[in-house]
Amino acid sequence: MLKIEKITGAIGAEISGIALSRDLTSDVCDEIYDALINHQVIFFRDQDLSPEAHLQLAKSFGEPEPPHPVYPHVEDFENIVLLKSGGGDVPDTNDWHKDMTFKANPPFTSILHAVNVPAVGGDTLWSSTSAAYDNLPDAWKTHLEGLEAMHDIGTFRNDFYKKGGIEAVNNALKDTGSAVHKIIDTHPVSGLKYLNVNQSFTRNIVGMIQGESDRILHYLYQHMAKPEFQVRFRWRNNSIAIWDNRITHHYAICDYLPNIRHMQRITVLDDKRLAKTN
């Protein structure tokens, strides 16, 4: 039986009593899914997870995404993103972001496996965007209701520029395009309202001049970053984090250089349980 312990009042739980490499019955997978919906991000310790087992776990949630447009993948496993940074390789994930909101349908969840992490540093923060919404003043909720914002590749411009200069950036923007999302959205399973903007990929509010849009977005980013809405996870080798990308955003702290931080991630496109009910 799974043991689930809440970590903070707003977000996060640690789950024990399971070996993810061998205990994945359909009932256990449903329990893990329910815990994810209830706590928004869940953590497991001491999980010796092979790439094959990692992929099996991901498929219990839905279809893994194809190769990432920027990051490399694990050899022989194109669905597993290799996130290895340190030394001269400086990461770009130390910014608050939801994954790939420049897509019309951003992914549902990600499963991150710590393969080899530094003894000190390299924690990850997750913030509940529903808790952030709940704690907005009512006047702000009213003002934001019905507004939409444009998202594009944002921070990834730097990666494309390093590869091929401004032409590569322009081609990437053309290839990936942009997306428009509601600033206040509703979670399709829990029914919770949440704020749907993030610093990495949200560019501007539809219908507003840039200055006005920037002032509102800056306020929301500062509000969403309050510690009261967060959980901070200290990684150890073979720790696992699974988060609901719809209702959280996260920040990977870069305080471990020049040490190496080796992580492997699978992102799941759609919530297959939700699809069955629609």
Image (cartoon, rainbow, N blue to C red):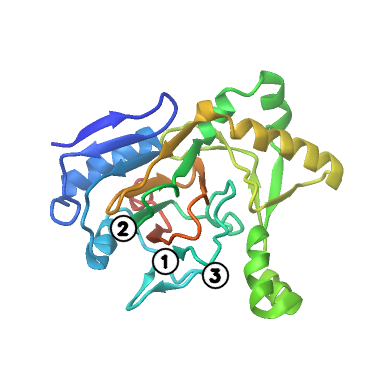
**With respect to residue 196, does 52 lie above or below?**
below
> Upstream in the sequence, badge 2 or badge 1?
2
Q: Disc 1 marks which residue? A: 81
Q: Is residue 278 visible?
A: no
Report how far apart the C-alphas of labels 2 and 3 lie in the structure. 20 Å
Q: Quadrant of residue 54?
A: bottom left
Please give the label number shown on residue 72: none
From the image, tell me which residue sits under label 3: 70
Q: Is residue 83 above or below residue 235?
A: below
The type of residue carrying mark 3 is Val
**Image quadrant of residue 220?**
top right
Q: Are marks 2 and 3 in contact (CB under 8 Å)?
A: no
Q: In terms of sequence position, does the residue under pointer 2 or pointer 3 come before the other? A: 2
Residue at 69% over, 69% down: 173
Can you tell which mark lies on residue 58? 2
SS label for mark 2 = helix
| Amino acid tagged 2 | Ala
User: Crowdedness of circle 1 by 10 Å Cα count: few (<14), some, many (20+)?
Assistant: many
Q: Position of residue 193 (x, y in %)?
A: 54, 32
Q: Secondary structure at mark 1?
A: strand
Q: Residue at x 61, y 58 (%)?
A: 102
Give percent across and percent down for residue 34.
Answer: 30, 38
